[in-house]
Amino acid sequence: MRHQNYLFPGHPIIQDDRYFKLSQDSVVLSSFAKVRKKERLLDLGCGIGVLTLLMLLRCPGSRATGLEITEGAAELARENLALNGMEDRGEILTGDLRDFPKHLYGAYDVCISNPPYFDPNRGFSSQTDILATARNEKSGDIWDVCRTAGQALKWGGRFYVCYPPVRMADLLEALRTAKLEPKTLRLVFPDESHAPCLVMVEARKGGGAGLNILPSLIISRDGQKTDEFKRIYQLEEPTDAR
């Protein structure tokens, strides 16, 4: 079933129950990433275009390409770009990130990804093959994602990625294996009494050693969303307009 939500006021996004939807992780990652005017961004595993659109909205003057393996999700991503008047700044490619086109090696200033989190051999299952592709690593694990980011980036380019903290060691190892040096890290906590629910990392292609740990992002305090979290959304939780 298709339905409409809003990324920010005045910026709708069409979702479909068959595909992975707008998520909190993508929203907070888009606020962590930095893209400058005229830079080219690549969103690896873009799904229905949520993160691609968020970055275009947050970074006026930038250009973005989304890469998505599922044709139906890619078509919906193109529709969402058009719905927001972003056809002139964004494009969606259909393809497997594990077979990244060689003519695009070194073509991008920035890469970003909210990748699949789950090992398909460790208990995670999904009700459909399409959702499983978006949420587990059957179509590419974190080493594949980092390797492709390293191929796509210019020397000195930046890669922004989020991942479960329980798998942080895998993420950092995968980044360094791909010659992407972790430079900035930020943890996200649901509140002050629970363990972190997300880690966000900025890595630089060819960067020198040295990792800056930012103050943590706290989502809720005393049962209320924090001011910083509200600013990230620029509105209350996205409204479902079915």
Image: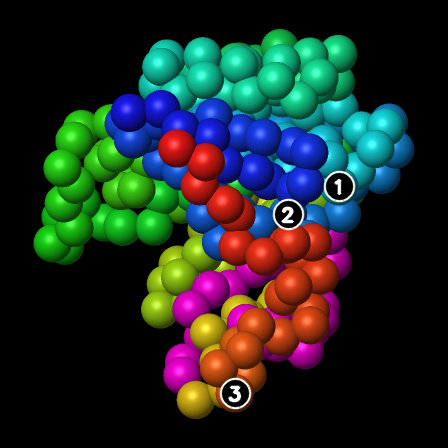
What stretch of residues is rendered in magenta? 194-219
Determine which quarter of the picture holds residue 164.
Answer: bottom left
Q: Which amino acid does label 1 sit on?
A: Arg
| Left or right for 201, reference 22 | right
User: What residue appears at the point 44 percent right and 22 percent down from the top-left corner?
Assistant: 68
Residue 132 visible (yes or no)? yes
Q: Which of 160 and 25 is in front in this view?
A: 25
Distance in Å between CA atoms under marks 1 and 3: 29 Å
| Left or right for 214, reference 100 | right
Look at mark 2 in the image and give the residue it sits on: 30
Q: Which amino acid does label 2 sit on?
A: Ser
**Contact, mark 1 vs mark 3 (Cβ under 8 Å):** no
Label 2: element kind: helix
Look at mark 1 in the image and give the residue it sits on: 58
Tell me the number on the disc at residue 222.
3
Q: Earlier in the sequence, mark 2 or mark 3?
A: 2
Q: Which amino acid does label 3 sit on?
A: Asp
User: What residue appears at the point 62 percent right and 75 percent down from the top-left corner?
Assistant: 226
**Residue 241: x, y in percent?**
45, 36
Q: Earlier in the sequence, mark 1 or mark 3?
A: 1
Determine which quarter of the picture holds residue 170.
Answer: bottom left
Which callout, 1 or 3, points to the residue nearer the camera? 3
Vertical relation: 205 (above or below) 222:
above
**Contact, mark 1 vs mark 2 (Cβ under 8 Å):** yes
Vertical relation: 117 (above or below) 137:
below
Q: How many marks?
A: 3
**Residue 162: x, y in percent?**
51, 54
Q: Tell which residue pokes out farthest to the front in this image.
A: 242
Q: Does the magenta stretch include residue 226?
A: no
